[in-house]
Amino acid sequence: MTLELFNNEFHVITGQLKSYLLRITASVPDAEDIVHDTYVKAASKLDGFRGESSLKTWIFTIASNIAKDNLRAQKRWVENVSDICREEAMSNPAFFGEAMHIRATSPHGAFEIREHITFCFTCISKSLPLEQQLCIFLKEVYEFKIGEIAVILNTTEAMVKYYLHTGRAKMIHIFDGRCSLISKEGICHQCSELNGIFNPEQKFQEELVKIEMARAAESADKETLLDLRMKIVQEIDPFESGASELQLHHLEHNRNVMEKYV
Amino acid sequence: MQNGKATTEKKTFSRETSVSIDIQSDPAIIWKLLTTAQEYPRWNPTVISIYGEIAKGNKIKLKSALDPKRVFKLQVKEMDDGKKLVWGDGMGTRVYALNGNGRGITNFAVSEKIGGLMFPLFASQIPSFDSSFEQFALALKKEAESIQSLSK
């Protein structure tokens, strides 16, 4: 493969790669650094690319290896990350001041419930063991096949299936106990709280019925509700969406809080 | 027996319960389920909790649904990757064994032998393991086959 062809292909998948890395690291600088390091490493090893997998799979393999090296040195987050970060935000007037400024001035500063669902998924997923988190994103959001994920993570298809199954089971358990959008027993109402702060004129329930997962909450089974949640994640680019700047600001806050907490 | 039905052999100084079942799953999946302590309560109704890492020489604390008030302090005595796991205490030893047939079916067998010189004195107070072993084997089969059947 020529460098020119590689550059073209890399450019095409950069958006997906960057969003994947953001979602597993919860850090914009880390995601950007790893994209850069991946490019350098892949370009320098281009002669070693034999086409046994797709170029996209090969690039995600390099990126995942770099990310895993970084993430293994860090502790995993906790299931109640939202509660802990909410408390910190409430005691930090600067946080809401910055957020309101972004909301008022940025073209990417809207608050949207779907965006917050995606943000929340990213945060909660960081409480899973790393392999489970990577498998879930690679399969359910970035649509790699199980065999491709086995290549990317240098493991077997059997283990990918195990990580996917256990990761999904944990995410279902966590959201079922926490998310008031899908469960009457859910203890987290952060979507409606933040919507009230950032969109005071908006009627939350009217917004909610626009979201398939919320509409299906009473009739669908838990697996389906998780699939619908991940469909939302899949549809949103965390760097380009209308709410990206506000959500990235929120994510940076949560990351700082979690780094001190865990 | 490979049908998931437990059998118990009683002797004066010991008692041994066994069960075996065929599972349509890669042995690696079954092995991972058997050796990941924190996952047990999610798929196995016979286990309330296991604390500690299941690794050779390690001590683990197990709470069984059979006797929820008691914490069994067990030592992992043997781990032959993907094939055999043994844990136990001074009173008994439990052996898990996996045998893949290479055609997608793995036979899972578990047996536990308890006993000793004092065994006849308290044998009548120890509940039967049969039902618990059958539940264990069926739950493992269900979970492993569910994982194996994930679409590509």
Image (spheres, rainbow, N blue to C red):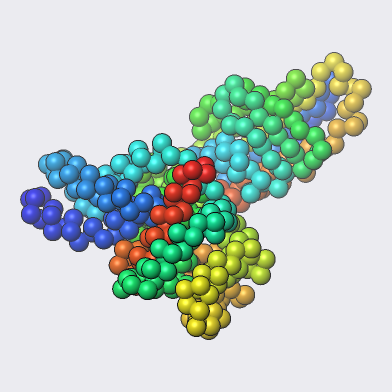
Measured as percent of width and height from the top left, residue A108 is found at 33, 70
* Residue A118 at least partly seen: no
Measured as percent of width and height from the top left, residue A243 is found at 37, 70
Q: Of A76 and B20, which appears nearest the observer?
A: A76
On the picture, is A16 further left or further right than B140?
left
On the picture, is A46 further left or further right than A57?
left
Q: Would you place residue B51 above or below residue A103 in this image?
A: above
Q: Would you place residue A106 above or below residue A63 in this image?
A: below
Q: Of B27 and B57, which appears nearest the observer?
A: B57
On the picture, is A262 further left or further right than A154?
right
Measured as percent of width and height from the top left, residue A81 is found at 54, 53
Q: Would you place residue A119 above or below residue B21 in this image?
A: below
Res B79 quadrant in image? top right
Q: Would you place residue A42 above or below residue A189 in this image?
A: above
Residue at the image position 80 percent from the left and 22 percent from the top: B115
Find the residue positioned furthest to the top.
B117
Residue at the image position 66 percent from the left and 46 percent from the top: B41
* Residue A253 at least partly seen: yes
Residue at the image position 80 percent from the left and 34 percent from the top: B70
On the picture, is A134 further left or further right than B18?
left
How many numbered marks have been drawn onto this rendered protein structure? 0
